[in-house]
Image: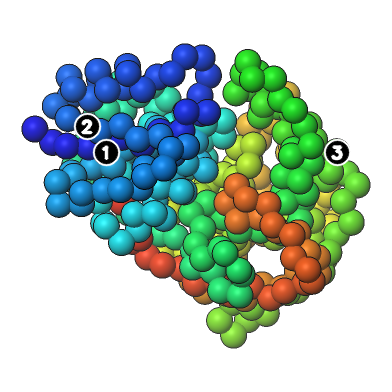
Amino acid sequence: MKFAKLIYNPKAGEGADPTQNIITILKKAGYECSLSSTKEEGWEKLDAKGTDLIIVAGGDGTVRKVAFEFLDKRLPIGLLPLGTANNIAKTLELEEDPEDIITQWDLKRIKRFDVGRIYNLKDQKFFIEGLGFGVFPRLMKEMQKITTRKDASTDKRIKTALEILHDIVLDYEARKCTIQIDDAEHSGNYLMAEVMNTRSIGPNLNLVPFSDPGDGQFEVVLIAESQREQFANYILSKIMGKEEPAFFSILKAKKLKIYWEGVHLHVDDEYIKFDKATEIKIELQEDAVHFLTTRV
């Protein structure tokens, strides 16, 4: 029988604690497992030799926390999305129902996932979703001020974030950004500069819907000041429940340097404020994380 370490975020998801139901499903699927909460000390302790699989039940933040903790273990990760945005799970094209996911797992069927290696940024060494400047870090800052009801649905949380982002886009002062990719330099005034590894970020902004997180390249999305109305309309369509295609400038990169004339940025789901504008160096680390996939 295969052994799995199940790590969960007790604050993720809606309704009652799902972990006992997940354990029952795992046992039916042939897994013995241990259970650890990310809110408890010692959750990161792992017998790598005696573990076949790490299972993460939570949102994007929990996935990031676990993936980077065990980056050197090279164990496959089974993801059960219980968060709000679940951008990593959406990139992996996973279903939302844990039983549907678990019953399709095969330890030989994995999806290789690249990560970003960050330089010149204290306390932040990697990202799995993206790193960026502009309206998205501003959204994260504003969302910190809002008290959301604990019983608010996922759809309500996403819609609230989109509504705030729409207002930000209309008023945000574009900033100069310079990006160096190999020997090419790209410069202009932008509302957003985002180095993406997943297909979507934040409140499910599907800015690179066909990207492959294991292809050895980042997608660098640039939304210029001249595209303000286009971007606002894209967000408005999402608020109304419509998924319109996004057409913004996209550059491919394995390594880059990015300088933004501002002090706010984000690394995955963490908002960061600099003391002063700083150039960030990023390199792609290929084949860093292995996720179980339900796709053949």
Taking 100 as reference, is 40 left or right?
Answer: right
**Which residue lies at the image location 25% right of the left edge and 20% below the top edge?**
25
Instruction: Give the mark, 3 or 1, whose residue is nearer the N terminus.
Output: 1
**Image location (x, y in percent) of residue 165:** 78, 39
**Image location (x, y in percent) of residue 30:** 14, 27
Name the amino acid, label 2. Cys
Distance from Cα at disc 2 to Cα at disc 3: 46 Å
Disc 2: CA contacts within 10 A as few (<14), some (14-19) or many (>=20) = many
The single residue placed furthest to the left in the displayed view is 1
Disc 3: CA contacts within 10 A as few (<14), some (14-19) or many (>=20) = few
Q: Is residue 90 visible?
A: no
Q: Quadrant of residue 200?
A: top right
How many badges with numbers are in the image?
3
Q: Is residue 12 visible?
A: yes
Instruction: Give the mark, 2 or 1, whose residue is nearer the N terminus.
Output: 1
Distance from Cα at disc 2 to Cα at disc 1: 5 Å
The circle drawn on residue 5 is 1
In this view of the protein, which residue sits in the foreground, 78 or 207? 78
**Image location (x, y in percent) of residue 274:** 74, 65
Disc 1: CA contacts within 10 A as few (<14), some (14-19) or many (>=20) = many
Taking 292 as reference, is 221 left or right?
Answer: right
Residue ID for mark 3 = 167
Residue ID for mark 2 = 33
